[in-house]
Image (spheres, helix red, strand yellow):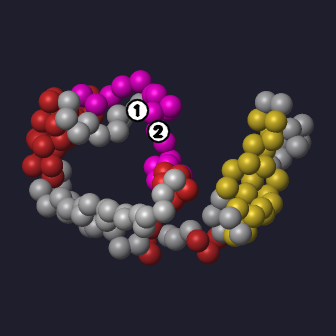
Amino acid sequence: MAEAGLVVLATLSIRQKETLCALRIYGNSIMVHTMYYADEVESLDDLNLPEASVQISPQEKAMAKMLVDHLRGDSELETYHDRYRDAVLALIEAKLNSTKPIEIKPAPAQGKVGDLMEALRASIEAAKKGSAKPDAVQET
């Protein structure tokens, strides 16, 4: 594959579902990349995207840049966890150690942001105070 510059297309099963993948040489190993089937890829024309006439004011851009600059930091991949897996493991552990029924709290309601400027201001204030700091923005 490496000498011929080829990539192999194949299928594999992940969680009882067949998935399209590409196999390619990476160093001394073979890397697997999952892919979409052709019928899963939609044209941008088929999507209901907002009109291109949406305008972002210079103030909104400046505030967004300020927020990104304030939150920028080094990548610390160890700080990211699969929260779903952690919750399932905690539930299993709680069930193993208890004879009482376990109550699960409902997820908090997520609000809808109506004003971008107000949301940016709130995020910048929260970031300055160090409270409820969102995930760091990373440079790529």
Look at 50% across and 70% down and name the residue there: 43
Q: Secondary structure at mark 2?
A: loop
Three-letter code for the amino acid on which mark 1 is drawn: Gln
Q: Quadrant of residue 75?
A: top left
- Give whichever of 58, 100 is nearer the camera: 100
| Residue 27 in the image: above or below residue 58 | above
The x and y percentages for residue 33 are: 69, 50
Kindly identify which residue carries mark 2. 80
| Labels 2 & 1 near each other (Cβ < 8 A) | no
- Give whichever of 55, 20 is nearer the camera: 20
- Which labelled disc corresponds to residue 1? none
Residue 133 seen from this side:
yes
Q: Secondary structure at mark 1?
A: loop
Residue at the far top in the pictured view: 74
The x and y percentages for residue 102 are: 41, 64
Q: Specify few, some or many for label 1: CA neighbours under 10 Å numbering under 14, 14-19, or 20 or more.
A: few
Three-letter code for the amino acid on which mark 2 is drawn: Tyr
- Which labelled disc corresponds to residue 138? 1
Look at 74% across and 48% down and name the residue there: 32
Look at 68% across and 64% down and name the residue there: 15
- The mark nearer the N terminus, 2 or 1, is 2
Q: Is residue 87 left or right of residue 36?
A: left
| Residue 36 in the image: above or below residue 130 | below
Give the distance between the C-alpha atoms of the residues marked 2 and 1, in whole angstroms.
13 Å
Look at 83% across and 47% down and name the residue there: 6
| Residue 61 in the image: above or below residue 56 | above
The x and y percentages for residue 105 are: 32, 62
Residue bounds of the magenta highlight: 70-89
